[in-house]
Structure formats: C-alpha cells, structure tokens
Image (cartoon, rainbow, N blue to C red):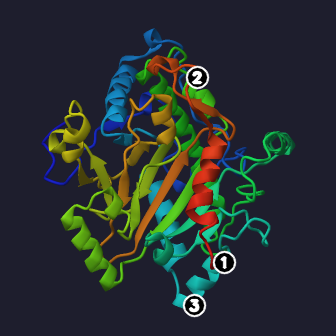
C-alpha cells in the first residue's frame, strides 16, 4: 500500500482474484456479452469461466497465496476491499450503470413515473407481487432512506426447486406466518430500457462466477478444514441484485444530513439520517458497482486512521469513525456480510456502512449480493470455536426476517 489516505478517506486494500478465475480473452467487447446456455435467473457459473479448484493449501500457486493472505487481512479489518482481476470488462460495468440511469432518469417526469409504476413492488398475491421484486419509490418519511430501488432475486424455478422449497416451508408452518409467497415470484423488467431484460441475467451469471471464486479463496484464507465449504454453501446462491437510484436531496434534508455528519452522531441518532441508513449487509458477499460519485459511501471503521484492531471495548469504540470508500475505476467495492461474521464467530467483520449523497447529480449504485443457498444452516464453524450447541440460523429465515421488517410490512402505499 502506498501513501496513507487523507483524513476521512478509507485506504482499502486491492485484492486481485484473477488467479482463482479466468475468462477467454475474447470477452472484451459488448458483442460477446450474450451468454448462451445460462439460465435466466443467473444460477450456476458462466459456461466459459475457468475456476481453478486447488484441493489443499499446498496446491495454491504463488499468486493464489498472495490473494489468500490479502483476503484474510481484509475480512478481519476493515471488512471492505477493492476487487480487481475479476474479468468483468469496464465496458460492461458502465453499460449496467447506464441502464440504471436510463431507467431512473430518461424522458420526461410522466414517462419515467409510468414505467417505474408499471413494475412497482406489490404485496404477495396482489397482481404479480411477491413482496420483494420490482421498483420501490423514495420513502424517506417512513424509512429515512432517500433512494429508490429496482430489485431482482434468484428465482425459485424448476419442479425440483419448487417442490423442495414447498416441503421446507410445510415442515415449519409457524416460522413465518402471514408472508406466504414472499420472494417466490418472477423478476420484473421495465419496457425501457428494453436491453435490461437481456443484459442483466448475463451480468448476474458472470458475478456468480466471480462470487464463487472469492468464496473459494475465502475458504483458504480462513484456513478451513474443507476449503470448499463456502463454495458448497453458496452453490445455489439465492442472490440479489439491486439497481439503486439516489436523487439529490431536497434542500431541507441536505442541510439536516450535513449537520448530522459534522456532529458525528452515535448509532441511535444516526438512524435519523436520510440517504441510506447505517447497516451491515445481512447476507454473505456484496460486490458493489457504482458511478464515480465521491464521498457517498461511508464505512465505519475502528481505530482511527491507523486501523489498530488491537484496541478493544470502549476504547476501540471511541476511535470509530466514518470514512469514505470511494469507487476505484474497474474495481468492485466488496464487503462481507452477517453470515460470514456468524460463520467465524465474529472474527471476520461485517462492517456497518451507510450512504450520504449530498451532491447535485443523480447517483446510480448497483450492488450484487452473492448469498448462501436458501436453506443453508449457518452456525459458527469449528475452526472458530463452534460446537453443535451454538445458535444457528437458516439463511431463508434470516432473509425473510430482514425483508419482512424492511419493506414488506412497512410499505403502505402500494
């Protein structure tokens, strides 16, 4: 790492994943972005991806060892890093961002609102609704988040998947009463831009391959007895892609947000800030693609600028601060989620972050969440002191609880 960051800027490590994944050199142009034989919902690997599968630590190449060492340090602290060498071309990344910008901003106000409302998120059983997929408008009054979202999830598709999921739910009818059908619909695509319907499934398929490569490297980084454990847990990833739009804040909100940022509010007060409130990601691995807007993504790190992870308790908390994690051209900003923290008993960090977009432009952000399979049981691993008596959670339960609490029941203006 070169020069220390300026005050308030997080100097993220850059981790090259290319030794765990490679793509044909012909994948440089948009003409090659259509991927045949890839299921519509993005399950499985890109058919042309090459994913080396070392069996033991002795099988790692020098380049893989470098990646593994850097990844181990990054997930410990700060829990965020830049991912390079992923093989997704800048042209494709920019095309995805442009599709988001077209969806949110192209045309006059009436045309934009019409196409968004045509695929608005609806309650389960209402028209096409499954309580989660589709467009959600800015809802700052009830959620204190000044952004809108178009959400896509892996689809529960095929007779075997549907039957397994129904049997899973039938075996535990009292777990989530009242949310039958949640997340069981189809993804909704707008009429404009029409290219989104063709491009996004291919983009998701590529990121599923990248996600598998990172999870394989993570298994070695955490020195698991079975380095393929994370790969197996995410093999049928119930992924999520969110296409987020951040309009400029109204003047009154902007003044409030800037004032609260200057005052360095504590966690409880921080929840009052508009934008995207402080949170950790509830899944496994987040790969963030965002436009060039600086100063928007804020990460809460411990130990001040020196990142001293040895400090504990109140002394450590006192040195926590919000710092910027600005985009790096051609790289993804990556962070781990709550499931990895639970697997490691808190050793790895699911770091709290938020968005404070105070600029005048419309900001586009497209996070991709590479998650465990629906019914995976997550508990602390033996390598981190875990036993069969430790608390456990099924990923589906965790996901439903978050969606149910975030916008399924709170949403009142369908």
For marks 2 and 1 on the same chain, the one whose residue lies earlier in the sequence: 2
Task: Tell me the CA gap for discs 3 and 1.
Answer: 18 Å
**Residue 71 visible in the displayed image:** yes
Residue nearest the observer in this picture, 365 or 63: 365
Assign a secondary structure to mark 3: helix
Side of 349 relative to 225 (left or right): left
Side of 146 relative to 255 (left or right): right
For marks 3 and 2 on the same chain, the one whose residue lies earlier in the sequence: 3
Assign a secondary structure to mark 1: loop
Q: Residue at position x 34%, y 41% from top?
A: 81
Q: Residue at position x 38%, y 37% from top?
A: 349
Q: Quadrant of the C terminus?
A: bottom right
Q: Which residue is mark 1?
A: 414
In the image, is residue 267 above or below residue 123? above
Figure quadrant of residue 45: top right
Q: Residues within 10 Å of mark 1 (few under 14, many from 20)?
A: few
Q: Residue at position x 59%, y 65% from top?
A: 407
Residue 186 on image: x %, y %: 74, 59
Side of 384 relative to 392 (left or right): left
Residue 253 on image: x %, y %: 33, 79
For marks 3 and 1 on the same chain, the one whose residue lies earlier in the sequence: 3
In the image, is residue 282 above or below residue 96? above
Q: Nearer the viewer, mark 3 or mark 2?
A: 2
Task: Tell me the CA gap for discs 2 and 1.
Answer: 43 Å
Q: Which residue is mark 2?
A: 389
Q: Which residue is mark 3?
A: 110
Task: Tell me the CA gap for discs 3 and 2.
Answer: 57 Å
Residue 128 on image: x %, y %: 77, 68
Residue 369 on image: x %, y %: 53, 48
Q: Residue at position x 52%, y 63% from top?
A: 243
């Amino acid at each position: 790492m070169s020069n220390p960051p300026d005050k308030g800027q997080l100097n993220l490590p850059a981790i090259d994943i290319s030794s765990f994944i490679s793509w044909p050199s012909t994948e440089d142009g948009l003409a090659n972005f259509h991927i045949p034989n890839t299921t519509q919902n993005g399950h499985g690997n890109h058919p042309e991806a090459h994913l080396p599968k070392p069996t033991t630590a002795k099988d790692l190449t020098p380049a893989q060892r470098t990646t593994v060492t850097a990844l181990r340090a990054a997930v410990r602290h700060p829990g965020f890093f830049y991912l390079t060498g992923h093989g997704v071309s800048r042209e494709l990344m920019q095309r995805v961002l442009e599709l988001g910008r077209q969806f949110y901003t192209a045309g006059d106000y009436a045309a934009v609102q019409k196409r968004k409302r045509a695929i608005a998120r609806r309650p389960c059983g209402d028209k096409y609704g499954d309580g989660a997929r589709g467009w959600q408008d800015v809802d700052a009054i009830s959620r204190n988040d000044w952004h809108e979202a178009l959400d896509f999830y892996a689809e529960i598709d095929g007779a075997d998947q549907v039957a397994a999921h129904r049997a899973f739910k039938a075996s535990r009818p009292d777990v989530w009463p009242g949310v039958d059908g949640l997340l069981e619909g189809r993804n909704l695509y707008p009429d404009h831009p029409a290219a989104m319907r063709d491009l996004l499934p291919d983009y998701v398929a590529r990121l599923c391959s990248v996600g598998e490569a990172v999870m394989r490297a993570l298994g070695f980084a955490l020195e698991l007895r079975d380095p393929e454990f994370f790969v197996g847990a995410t093999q049928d990833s119930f992924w999520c892609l969110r296409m987020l739009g951040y309009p400029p804040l109204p003047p009154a909100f902007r003044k409030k947000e800037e004032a609260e940022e200057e005052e360095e509010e504590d966690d409880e007060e921080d929840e009052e800030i508009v934008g995207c409130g402080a949170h950790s990601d509830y899944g496994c691995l987040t790969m963030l693609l965002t436009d060039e807007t600086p100063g928007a993504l804020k990460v809460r790190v411990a130990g001040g600028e020196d990142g001293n992870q040895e400090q504990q308790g109140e002394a450590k908390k006192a040195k926590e601060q919000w710092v910027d994690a600005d985009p790096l051209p051609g790289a993804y900003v990556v962070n781990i989620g709550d499931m990895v923290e639970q697997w490691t008993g808190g050793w790895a960090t699911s770091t709290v972050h938020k968005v404070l977009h105070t600029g005048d432009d419309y900001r586009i952000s497209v996070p991709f969440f590479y998650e465990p399979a629906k019914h995976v049981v997550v508990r602390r691993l033996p390598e981190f002191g875990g036993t069969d008596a430790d608390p456990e959670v099924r990923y589906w339960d965790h996901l439903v609880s978050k969606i149910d609490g975030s916008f399924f029941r709170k949403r009142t203006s369908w």
